[in-house]
Image: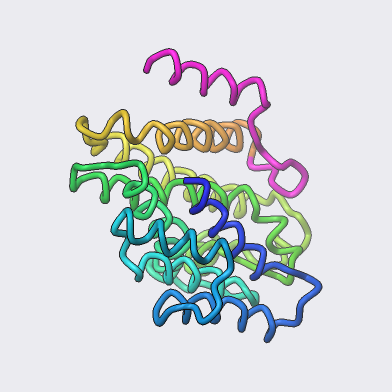
Amino acid sequence: MVVFYAFCRTMDDLADDPSAPLAQREQALLSWRDGLLHGFSNPTELQKQVIDLRERRAIPNELLTAIIDGCRMDLEPRRFATWADLDAYIWKVAGAVGLVSIRIFGCVDANSEKYAVTLGRALQLTNIMRDVGEDFANGGRIYLPLEDLKRFGCTEKNLAKDSKSAAFLAMMDFEATRAESFYKKAEAILPERDREALVPARIMAEIYRAVLVRMRRGGFDVFRVRYSLSRLRKISILLRYWIAR
């Protein structure tokens, strides 16, 4: 899992490096993509490890390249007209990550794939909601579907002014309900055979779900508060799963 984490972290860093021109960042990501598809001419140690992991765990190449494509989508501010558009992005940056992870965890039940993709939606949507203010400040990025902003009468000015307008709060409550539905669905389809293998994913689910609850109770004050759990709360969650095992 350490190698896969390093791969994901490297892709994020390549996409977000503020010191590198846009074209250079995209080329660096494309170089990784081409290497995974056609082989690296002079692979780095990490590239060797990723290839070895791919072969040992029978990880489909398209999952790794999807993660890269998701990072490429973040190179410039973009908007998502509909939930379907956002969901396609989420599949790359969260669903594909989950599908690789369950192979590393050693999951054997086919339903673990559905669990991974569904939980990925819940986690990523929670993350998007938490970072609404930060993302808008970073080049006017809006990840929430524009159709949802329109439905509740929430404008970009609301985001620009760090507004907790009634329209904004109604939209955020709608998105929170959507995210919660994915957490519930993931919980319902958790395969018993892979229950132990999926402990890391279940821990992530509990942490992020608690963050969602905290956002809701705090009135979605995402422009002034970065919602998270305390270190002690996270440790208590980890210990509970460790003791249960």
Q: Quadrant of the C terminus?
A: top left
Which residues make up the magenta segment? 220-245
Query: Could you say which quadrant of the image residue 199 lies in?
Result: top left
Furthest residue toward top:
243
Furthest residue toward right:
19
Residue placed at 21% from the left, 30% from the top? 192
Asked if residue 100 lies left or right of residue 13, the reply is left
Q: Position of residue 15 (x, y in %)?
A: 64, 70
Asked if residue 241 lies left or right of residue 173, the reply is left
Colour scheme of the rendered structure? rainbow
Q: Position of residue 30 (x, y in %)?
A: 54, 81
Q: Nearer the viewer, residue 152 or 45?
A: 45
Q: Is residue 64 above or below residue 33?
A: above
Q: Nearer the viewer, residue 91 or 145?
A: 91
Residue 19 is covered by the magenta coloring: no
Q: Position of residue 78 (x, y in %)?
A: 59, 75
Q: Nearer the viewer, residue 219 or 47?
A: 47
Residue placed at 76% from the left, 55% from the top? 162
> How many numbered marks appear?
0
Q: Is residue 241 above or below residue 87?
A: above
Q: Is residue 217 above or below residue 52?
A: above
Q: Position of residue 50 (x, y in %)?
A: 46, 61
Residue placed at 64% from the left, 77% from the top? 76
Residue 236 is covered by the magenta coloring: yes
Residue placed at 61% from the left, 62% from the top? 10
Asked if residue 68 lies left or right of residue 16, the reply is left
Q: Nearer the viewer, residue 70 or 84?
A: 70
